[in-house]
Image (cartoon, helix red, strand yellow):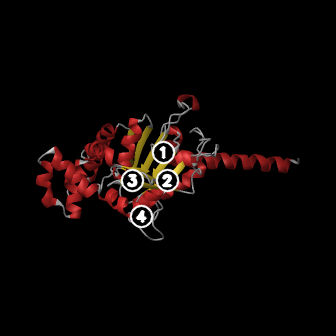
Amino acid sequence: MTNVGRIAVVAAGLAVAACQAGAAEKTVGYKSWSSSEIPRAEGVLRVMAIVAHPDDADFRMGCLAVKLSRMGVRVRFVSVCNGNMGHQTMMPPELAARRKREAEEAGRKYGIERYDVLDNADCSLMPDYERRVQLVKLIREFQPDFIVTHRTCDYHADHRAVGQLVQDAGYLLGVPHWVPDAPVQRKRPVILFATDSFTQPRTLRPDVMVDAEPFLEQWCEGVNCHVSQIYEWLPWDSGYQSELAAAKASKEGRNAYIIRHWAARKARDAKRFAENWKAKYPDTPVPGHIEVFEVSEYGRKPSADDLARFAGLVK
């Protein structure tokens, strides 16, 4: 190799190092883990919900989280936004701190391992490089078998952004030299979309259906922790304020109020996917409330046994 060639190779190497250093400066920090710090007991299932706001995971897979936690599955919820815009009067900094406390308390009620609330503001989340690195570090740290997130046809821009971020991360989890300070995930997770009611570009496909009925009472205990939302913001936003007095009067009143309004999606899904349920479980009556999930093509392709484990049908 000529001197000119050697100089060119060295210069190229320096340029790559500079680019990597610049990228590292832009990343949103999270604890770096070595592979020796991650206990990965064989047979212990790991499920991670990555959603936009504190309470999104509760509404979409709270009953499944209760079910899996009772079975010994490691379940974590991650809210990518801090929830600081979800109130009609409370100022954003105070609200963000309050919603973090509410989410953590709800997680304890469900029995899940952890409920993380990241410090990204509501209503301005973008599927950008910094947030992608942030999520890849979180995912690699936990090494989940399954990730639940939003579809990208959702009404809320934050929901769409999170769905995009998770799908963008799917392949990158297994690229060792990208975000090298976080251990690469050798077995890519199955990615699933939580239920929604949108029909464009198409209706959600019910790949996994879970009977929510046996877990509704414990789920209500967790949802009830989100006081700023259940008894303040959402009634104001949706016009349920006239029901608050009766709802607050007793545990039974609170549970009935929560099931009437915040389990309504589960009841609607039980009706709209009733034929799917009958075809899949012909010997089991259609429950009154179900939680529904669709497999994303951006993650690992699951087997029937994988999906049965995710649904808590087998250990």
Foreground pick, 301 / 104: 301
Q: Secondary structure at mark 4?
A: loop
Q: Which residue is mark 3?
A: 291
x, y (%) of residue 223? 27, 47
Q: Which residue is mark 2?
A: 192
Outermost residue toward the right? 1
State the separation of the CA atoms marked 3 and 4. Answer: 17 Å
Disc nearer the start of the sequence (2/1): 2
Checking the image for residue 50, the label placed there is none
Q: Secondary structure at mark 1?
A: helix
State the separation of the CA atoms marked 4 and 2. Answer: 15 Å
Residue 273 lies in quadrant: bottom left
Q: What amino acid does circle 1 point to?
A: Phe
Q: Are marks 2 and 3 in contact (CB under 8 Å)?
A: no
Disc nearer the start of the sequence (4/1): 4
State the separation of the CA atoms marked 4 and 1. Answer: 23 Å
Q: Residues within 10 Å of mark 4 (few under 14, many from 20)?
A: some
Q: Which residue is mark 1?
A: 310
In this rendering, position of residue 13 left or right of residue 191: right
Q: Residue at x 43, y 62 (%)?
A: 275
x, y (%) of residue 290? 37, 53
